[in-house]
Amino acid sequence: MQMGSVLNALFTFMQMIVGGIGVYQVIIGFAGFTRKKESRTKPVEKSFAILIAAHNEEAVIGSLLENLQKLDYPKSLYETFVICDHCTDRTVEIAQSLHVHTLERNRQAKRGKGHAIEWALNQQLWKLDREFDAVIILDADNLISSNFLLEMNEKLSNGYKVVQGYLETKNPYDSWVTLSYALMYWYMNRIWQLARYNLGLPNVLGGTGICVETGLLKEIGWGAQSLTEDVEFTARCVERGVYPTWAHDAIVYDEKPVGLRSSLRQRLRWMQGHFYCARQYFWKLIKVSVINRSLAQLDAAIYLFQPFRFLIYMAYSFMLYFQVATSAIDRWGIMQILPDWFWVLVSAVLYLQTPVVLMIEKKPFKAFLGYIPYFLFLLTWMPVTIWAFFTSNNQNWSHTQHTRAIKIEEVSK
């Protein structure tokens, strides 16, 4: 009897939480299927400091720096700073040869992107005679669209202080792993980011392609030194009532790991950082959302509560199997709050959202073929998540090796 009561309580809680979050995300996601036409009307006047954190990136840093020299933006209004973080290869030499600011960071106790950016801001950028209107944060393996700074200029001129660019995959068809990443990000860009932008909810930062207004950055500091500095900085901004926005036409191309092993290592780092940030900021965001009666701040808390969207998929798949495909509920006498059709319907909508996005984005047929191994990719998140949950105190940064020296002309076709 006591075991039955425990199972009832546990299953009731799971139905309420999983069911509620899933329906919420489905409803929000529908707003991502449409996009209102926007045009640039503001004068081109904002200045930018482009920060690139690099650790042994000789294979890719040259392509990015050449890309930045060709932007459709006045050269006098932006400067590039490469943070060479404990580099032992030719990264410094390549950066210097392309005549950008080369900031060498050596013999520092704390390594990793978050610490490197914090050091560059406090020890270098803020000490310059020139003050920029905003800071752009990129990864060394990135490429960006020629209109990137034009779009950021428009957002800043409209009063936004934190902006996230469209995250595209630089090498989507290198392997089934990279295609799975691409599917995940195409889904995110539409069903999560664009949907929230359309509804006036805060967007989430994605680690690169970020623009932050200088005044805000000086006021609150970067201060994001976890393994997922993007999640951490998002939470700190939303807690203060500063809501990041979305620039759908400002595209940043990001290289994804080709092999499963390197992908697992990268995603483990992401999840460890996400769980760490959830512990730090979830209840803070819940508290301020209640005090301010703010759906925007509650929405940001929900993002922290269920790290990455795949958990919705996994949770619904489990509930669908447990409740519909097995006799466990009847055998154990568990109370069924939500009917079978509910789990079937919501699960179907969740799984159909991605192919709908592919159609809206007019992706080629080979992108649709990636939906088959994509389910295996989703399954690999489960052991990563479990391991990350129990090792989330480990905040030791690990480097993801990048090898694809692709030119912007190749990816922007």
Image (cartoon, rainbow, N blue to C red):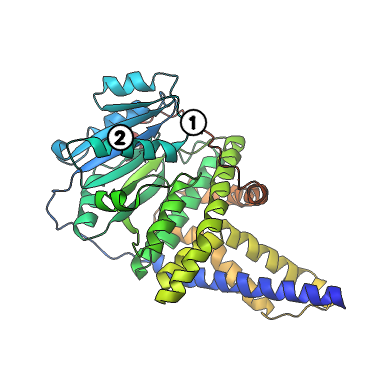
Residue at left offset 67%, top offset 47%? 387
Taking the view exactly as shown, the residue that stands out farthest to the right is: 1
Disc 2 marks a residue whose amino acid type is Glu
Query: From the image, which quarter does the C terminus lie in?
Result: top left
Picture coordinates of residue 304 (x, y %)?
Answer: 52, 60
Q: Count neighbours of disc 2 (C-alpha within 10 A) and say few if under 14, some if 14 to 19, many if 20 or more.
A: few
Q: Confirm whether residue 359 shows in the render.
A: no
- In the rendered structure, are the residues bearing label 2 and label 1 in contact, judged by CB atoms less than 8 Å apart? no
Q: Is residue 121 left or right of residue 335?
A: left
The numbered disc on residue 409 is 2
Q: Is residue 6 visible?
A: yes
Q: Determine whether 351 is above or below 9 in the image.
A: above
What type is the residue that disc 1 sits on?
Ala
Locate residue 370, reporting x and y percent: 54, 48
Tag 2, which secondary structure? helix
Front residue of 193/54: it is 54
| Residue 374 horizontal side relative to residue 74, left or right | right
Return the residue at label 1: 109
Which residue occupies 83% across, 76% down? 4
Q: From the viewer's perspective, tell me whether residue 22 is left or right of residue 205.
A: right
Snapshot quadrant of residue 361 = bottom left
Residue at the image position 34 percent from the left and 67 percent from the top: 198
- Where's residue 266, x and y in %? 55, 40
- In primary-sequence order, the first of circles 2 and 1 is 1
Alpha carbons under labels 2 and 1: distance apart: 39 Å
- Which quarter of the rendered picture does the N terminus lie within? bottom right
**Between 264 and 275, the one nearer to me in the picture:** 275
- Please tell me whether residue 179 is drawn above or below residue 239 in the rendered image: above
Residue 175 lies left or right of residue 155; in this view the side is right
